[in-house]
Image (cartoon, rainbow, N blue to C red):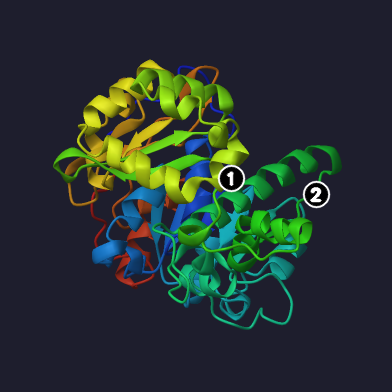
Amino acid sequence: MTESATLKRPLPLEGIRVVEFTHMVMGPTCGMVLGDLGAEVIKVEPLGGDSTRKLLGAGAGFYPLFNRNKKSLALDLHSEKGREVVQKLIATADIVSENFKPSTMQKLGLDYATLVQRHPRLIYVSHKGFLPGPYEHRTALDEVVQMMGGLAYMTGRPGDPLRAGSSVNDIMGGMFGAIGAMAALMQRQQTGKGQEVEAALFENNVFLVAQHMLQFAITGRAADPMPQKISPWGIYDVFSVKDKEQIFLAVVSDTQWAIFCQAFGFADLQVDPRLTSNNLRVLARHWLIPLLRERLASTPASELAALFEANGLPFAPITDPQHLFNDPHLNATGGLAPMTLPDGRETRVPLLPLKLDGERLGLRLDPPKLDEHGTELLLSLGYSGDEVAALRRDGILLPVQPGSVS
């Protein structure tokens, strides 16, 4: 295991220990955020490993992305000795994070009500499908809550609901779990006590569509799906141009409209009384946008981009995700960090989209191999080498520890 470059100063959560029992995306995202911010995050996995390690297709990137800056400990939690190990580990923790069914954690004695009796300073983060209420018994997935929470309706065409093109609720739900954990850490400084933090997919999704709910409350009109929406801007569209390339162009103010017309030599449009304000241009979209499509159709996308950039107008190329590895801005600003995958291959990974005191939060640990830190962690808890070896012989820990750093 090689450690990547990190900040030249202590990270904000340095000295905070997180023990997580998570899989898939939501729970691991919470730990990733806390780990990127400097916490020591210990991922407790079953002996067979987090099932997310083995996903194919759209899930192939889940494990390496959301489990960086973590340590791995694999053990049998259904055994008494395995639970003893994890209880000793939790005794050293500031935060426990989980995203399993409440009944699962209760059976293992790892639910908040049980742990808080022994550890009143413990912060316990639960990531669920729904906050407590009539739906809490349901099994939720990102796509489930997108469908029932209005997001798929807003994304798709009328009669054709479509999930967003990312695990938006899982990722954002994990982020809210991390925000809650950090808020609880701050409050613990004042009260000396921990607390339970709950984050949920459905409520997260409702937060995402809240702008459309409030649009209805204010206007009395239901929001149209995004492909059918009435744009608040005169020009805010994808244009097909020369050689079948596409580019997104926006002109969202009267000042920008004047600049746009002058840059492209559209004097006739600039003086047209039907287009003198943004709201008038919105009302004229039914004929204005087809006219602009016709006028711009023979121009290369690169030329349009250069003109828009030179004049400070909003634009965007239409980019596939894999091409972002070569994005000049990301590469020039350190937005992608080198990372070694558990199978030994090298890649790069996007970092958290923020800077602290002018520096990006880098990688300290690559996504761990299964049980990569098992021996190291048990020795730190006071187990002897012989005791660790015995636990491996008895099947409580992995019989063989791959990629050991201890």
Q: Which residue is label 2 attached to?
A: 193
Residue type highlighted by circle 2: Lys
Secondary structure of residue under mark 1: loop
Q: Could you tell me if residue 27 is visible in this image?
A: no
Q: Could you tell me if residue 374 is visible in this image?
A: yes
Residue 106 in the image, given as x and y percentages of width and height = 63, 77
Q: Is residue 303 left or right of residue 250?
A: left
Which is more toward the observer, 175 or 161? 161
Closer to the camera: disc 1 or disc 2?
A: 1
Residue type highlighted by circle 1: Pro
Q: Quadrant of the C terminus?
A: top left
Image mark count:
2
Is 11 located above or below residue 246 in the figure?
above
Residue 322 in the image, given as x and y percentages of width and height = 23, 45
Disc 1 to disc 2: CB gap under 8 Å: no
Is 108 located above or below residue 183 in the figure?
below
Rate crowding at label 1 as few (under 14), some (14 to 19) or many (20 or more) other CA atoms within 10 Å: few
Q: Which residue is label 1 attached to?
A: 232
Q: CA distance from mark 1 to mark 2?
A: 48 Å
At x 39%, y 53%, the residue is 72
At x 72%, y 43%, the residue is 183
